[in-house]
Amino acid sequence: MAYTVLARRYRSASFDQLVGQEPIARTLKNAIATGRVAHAFLFTGTRGVGKTSMARIFARALNAPDTIPDCPRPPAEEGQAPHEYPPKDVQDRMAQAIMRGDDLNVIEIDGASNNSVENVRQLISNAGLSPSDQARFKVYIIDEVHMLSTQAFNALLKIMEEPPSHVKFVLCTTEPHKVPVTIHSRCQRFDFRNIATGKIAGHLSEVLKAEKIEAQEQVVWQLARLANGSMRDGLSLLDRLIATGQQPLTNDVLEAMLGLPAQDLIAALVEALAQGDVASALQRTNDLLERGIAQDQLIDVLIDHLRQLMLLAACGAKSELVELAEEAKQAAAQQAANFDVSALVYMIALCENLQRAGKISSTPRALLDATIVRLALAEKMADVTALLSGQAPSAGTQKKKP
């Protein structure tokens, strides 16, 4: 039997299961309950945040409402008798087909590969046919709709302006600015947010529990941060990690699989910076590079580490902004105590300047070493600047003494 990836196996199948998009789910549910379902919707947002899943769930709620807990049946239109839905077992089969993407009344179209005017004309000709199997609506889900040609958009305009009563459109896109204003004006637009790191981590933990796989909490949070707000990316990374066949899933396994710098070496580097130990800081940097870590990747991880310290120093360990597992959070809090918030802001700015300068320099390693020395000597350099200007050293630019 073919293996089904986690992103498909744990795809949300109801409004309540969709993580991070609760306001949109609640609005669509209320629209169904009150009979205020528009004929066209535009779902926008980055990849992997639930646009297509929401479109399928919405179609399921319209045609098989009895299969979704706490989902009301769409009320009958004014002057018409209530729609006769098929029995529960038939609705169950319809719901499964909808979530798989192969239901006859829920037509999914990829805008990238079906972007010609002929494709849209065929869609229009089929839209006039009534739904089959006692379904109430025909739902057209057009993914990556911004890839349609100008002629295809023009052909779509007419039917979207005056569609048959049994037709609903759900357009999904990652680039709403490429969708013509004339299409925007005919749709109800919903902007899908990036999913919070904590919610991704919580969902990944549930998946690991269901799969009966052990993993360190720190690994789950690291995967959630690497997902960058995309649940699908988080599940794909977890799939890759599980494929290593090692249990429990540890930081060492994750770093080896993705080629990430070792967190303990990054922490040791920042500790050397906190102590103003130039020689140790340069040695730690060299150790990281000798492990095959690219300079850009090293800077990215260093910036992320400094950001966590900045959040801890500014907001405290209990803040939800700190995206670390409990054990890692305690260790980072002790390290953050060596810095002022303003010093950490300054250090992040230096790293960011190095990122830009390194891309156009013929000697990026020299710039990296110089920046590491500058970070380690930040306090002394601030003192010299203050003396030359005839002012007392600014406490905001100095690091705290351990």
Image: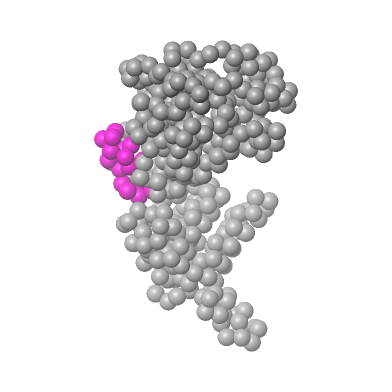
Q: Locate residue 284, reporting x and y percent.
A: 46, 58
Q: Identify the residue at image location x=45%, y=20%.
A: 81
Residue 283 visible at all: no
Instruction: Identify the colour scheme used.
Output: one colour
Instruction: Give the quadrant of the C terminus.
Output: bottom left
Q: Nearer the viewer, residue 229 or 329?
A: 229
Q: Position of residue 192 (x, y in %)?
A: 52, 41
Instruction: Choose between 174 and 249: the one closer to the eye.
Output: 174
Residue in the image at 52% along x and 79% along y: 395
Quarter of the figure with residue 253? top left
Quadrant in the rendering for residue 337: bottom left
Q: Residue at x 48, y 60 (%)?
A: 306
Question: 18 above or below 251?
Answer: above
Q: Is residue 221 magenta?
A: yes
Query: Is residue 19 visible in this depiction of the protein?
Result: yes
The correct choice, above or below, for 157 with respect to 105 in the image is below
Q: Is residue 266 above or below residue 192?
A: below
Taking the spot 63% from the left edge, 13% from the top edge, the residue there is 125
Q: Please state the extent of the stretch shown in magenta in the rendering.
A: 204-222
Numbered circles on residues, count: 0
Give the farthest residue toward the front. Answer: 79
Q: Position of residue 213 (x, y in %)?
A: 28, 37
Question: What type of secondary structure mainly makes up the magenta span?
Answer: helix
Expressed as whole percent of the image width and height from the top left, the position of residue 190 reads 55, 39
Position of residue 312 relative to residue 177, above or below, is below
Q: Is residue 331 left or right of residue 354?
A: left
Quarter of the figure that contains the N terminus: top left
Q: Is residue 51 magenta?
A: no
Nearest the camera: 371 or 320? Answer: 320
Q: Nearer the viewer, residue 359 or 132?
A: 132
